[in-house]
Amino acid sequence: MKSVQIVSYFLQGNSFPVVLKRDEETFLVKLRERMSGEFSLISEWFGNTLGNRIGLNTRTPFWITIPESVEFNDIYIEVRELVAKSVGVNIGYKYINQIQEVGMKELNSIDEDALTDIFLFDILMMNIDRTTTNLNLLNISGKPTISDFDSSLLFNEIAYGRDLLADNRILQCFRANPLYRNVENDRTDQFLEKVNHASIDSIIDEIPSEIIDDARREVLKKGIQERSKNGWRIKEALEKLECVILETEE
């Protein structure tokens, strides 16, 4: 059996990510005990995997099993408790030391088409967690790389039959997205063509049974198929957003 050791941690973000070493491989692992909801692992897997397949710069996710026999170095007691509660399948990425975050000032240097694709992908994923203070963009090898889909609401909407585009709070979040822009129909069609050529079912099939049972898996696959037929509701969302006036803090 491979030796698994927690060698470091970060007291930031929803998931208190830890640095896990498995033999000679090192991963940044997001602890499922601290993630933002029952579909957070699924959203993180789906968003990064689909993004990768359609040519977006996303990180390649891995399913990482934390065994009960996991070893610790000098780890903060609260993190030890979270690791203990997260024993089993978690999601992780190859660890890269000292990744730089992309800030608002750097957005002007990023290709406009790339930013448009990221914005459209946020709508597809129902990702409301991209803000001016939290761009969720990383600079990896000189490329802006999308991160963090665990707060996306796509699967919540599918599983519970909700219409989140009827919720003004959701529309306000999309309108406040720092990548918001008007997107022509032809440009949206190009994006949707890339998405619909991806093997969506296989992404869902790669989710471990510990995370999702067969019945729920089929519900999500059926919901995704319906979503695809409706253009992932992207054009509908864009039309609604044209009429949204941002509310002030006051």
Image (tube, grey):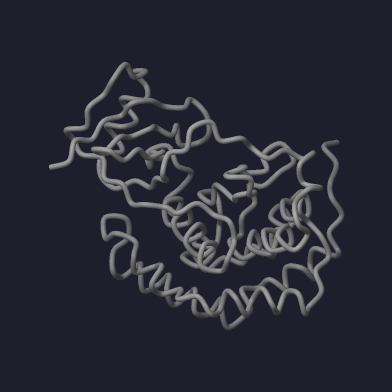
Point 69% across, 55% down: residue: 170
Quick one: which residue is furthest to the left in this view? 1
Point 84% across, 50% down: residue: 246
User: Hey, which quadrant is residue 131 in on the image?
Assistant: top right
Is residue 17 shown left or right of residue 72? right
Residue 188 vs 140, above or below: the answer is below
Point 78% across, 59% down: residue: 112
How far across and how far down the image is residue 130, in percent? 67, 47
Give the total of numbered labels.
0
User: Hey, which quadrant is residue 104 in on the image?
Assistant: top right
Point 30% across, 35% down: residue: 21
Is residue 249 shown left or right of residue 143? right
Residue 244 vs 220, above or below: the answer is above
Quick one: which residue is furthest to the front in this view? 141
* Foreground pick, 63 / 42: 63
How far across and how far down the image is residue 5, in percent? 26, 30
How far across and how far down the image is residue 175, in percent? 78, 55
In which quadrant is the N terminus drawn?
top left
In which quadrant is the C terminus drawn?
top right
Residue 179 vs 12, above or below: the answer is below
* Foreground pick, 98 / 14: 98
How far across and how far down the image is residue 39, in percent? 44, 54
Is residue 34 shown left or right of residue 190? left
